[in-house]
Image: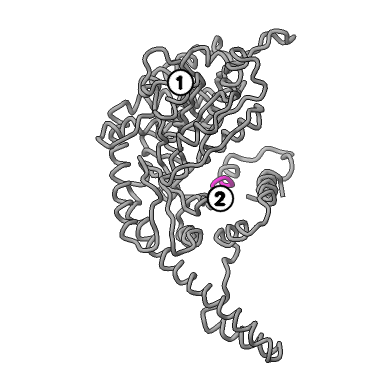
Amino acid sequence: MSAIHPRSFPARGATRESIFDAMQTLRAHDVKWRDGRVFSLVFHAGAETREIAQRAYDLFFAENGLNPTAFPSLRKFETDVVAMVASLLGGDGAIVGNMTSGGTESILVAVKAARDYFRKLHPEIKTPEMIAPVTAHPAFDKAAHYFDVKLVKTPVTADFRADPEATRAALTPNTILLVGSAPQYAHGVVDPLRELARIAREKNILMHVDACVGGMMLPFVRQLGYAIPDFDFAVPGVTSLSVDLHKYGYAAKGASVILYRPRALRRAMMYATTEWPGGIYASPTMLGTRPGGAIAAAWAVLNYLGADGYLHIANVVMKTVELLRAGIAQIDDVKILGNPDMSVMALASDTLDIYQVGDELTARGWHLDRQQFPPSLHLTVNYAHAQSAEQFLYALQDAVNAAKKMSARKLMDNVLVNVANRAARVLPAAWVSELTQRASTALGGGAGGGGRSAALYGMIGTLPNRGDLHELVLDLVEGFTTPQ
């Protein structure tokens, strides 16, 4: 590490050994995704699939997808990937699309395409609106912010699915796009997309399905015999669909696909300028330079696994889900929210601080994202978790037991505070302080989360102004990306 000076530009090049030693040292504290201890962020289908993706990526490491005439190989890979994914998702030969860098970009260009498509058809609409349930991915909020489209959010039903009646009630003459998820990320349920698409058809507006999480999983889960709601282009009225390949497609990051019906909608996604001195500049999606490695790796993995490979993986994943659901049902004080349709779920509690459970799991080497409204822990189960599911259930039981003790401790702290307040009316302050400290020590030490996320979330929950939280989050993001 001594040869690496990240705070200033290096005066001399470092050795290979020092560079990679430094990188290995820095990654030592990263989450252990290879061991199946991470329930988000990384999707791992085993060493062989990973090796295929890495080798394909390396073969096209330097190639640039900006200019398809320079690299016809990348053009072939991309058109093949789009065709393969479209055929998997109800395509009839009329579906068109492109690859993007990820789900956020796919959603961004889908909203941009809807806006520009309607600008031509209905120039009288000056303030376009899209309607999405509150569970829709924040990329729709980002798209609304970037492209000056008003986002109207609707409540969900008791099972966390979009409410078609609330959607219908939110329609205005400015509505251009409806949004649904397959499944939505927070709770893993598929929205009632047939009903939403029916509304879109009645009103002659567009309908986007965010299948970034489920697009490469749901078709195979259905083949296995699980009841999966209709969600893809087989649903009349669906006009665009996003699906990530670096999630349940197990391709290298970043790789997603955006699909359209009709073709004119994809045309509205594209951008071109012909008046630049440097020549004609055009790009189908938001990026200019596009990493050839990600495109090539997606093509390689889809062809390597094939339908039979993905079906096998889906079967392993769903059996792991069944094991986890059965195990969680045997643990008091925790539950799964709603009725997830595939392998994404939220873990909650009616009796414990679920964030405290999450902290105890983190202390035991497990990574689960924290969620809110209601408080919960997020689990996205993939192939890597088949090896670790039983270990996780043991860890969860331990974490629940520890959280119960912490909950009892907090209750006693509240009692101590009340007793101290009453004693302060008749006893000297020094006596009260001494008695409180002795009682606290006898009960097992001080309370509080010690800076862990349960305490942090508790603090955030008490802020009187959600705008305060917005600024705190921006401060955090800025801090992460600013050298210290």
Residue 6 seen in the current view: no
Rendered image: mark on residue 25: 2
163 left or right of 461 in image: left
Against 228, is 445 above or below? below
Q: Toward which corner of the image does residue 234 lie, by quadrant?
A: top left
Q: Is 25 a magenta residue? A: yes
Rendered image: mark on residue 149: none
Amino acid type, callout 1: Arg
Against 10, is 119 above or below? above
Q: How is the image coloured?
A: one colour
The residue closer to the viewer here, 164 or 66, is: 164
Spatial distance from mark 1 to mark 2, Cα to Cα? Answer: 56 Å
Of the numbered discs 1 and 2, the one sitting upstream in the chain is: 2
| Magenta span of residues | 21-26
Residue 248: give x, y in percent of width and height.
Answer: 40, 35
Label 2 residue SS: helix
Q: Residues within 10 Å of mark 2 (few under 14, many from 20)?
A: few
**Residue holding disc 1:** 201
Residue 112: give x, y in percent of width and height.
Answer: 60, 23
95 left or right of 139 in image: left
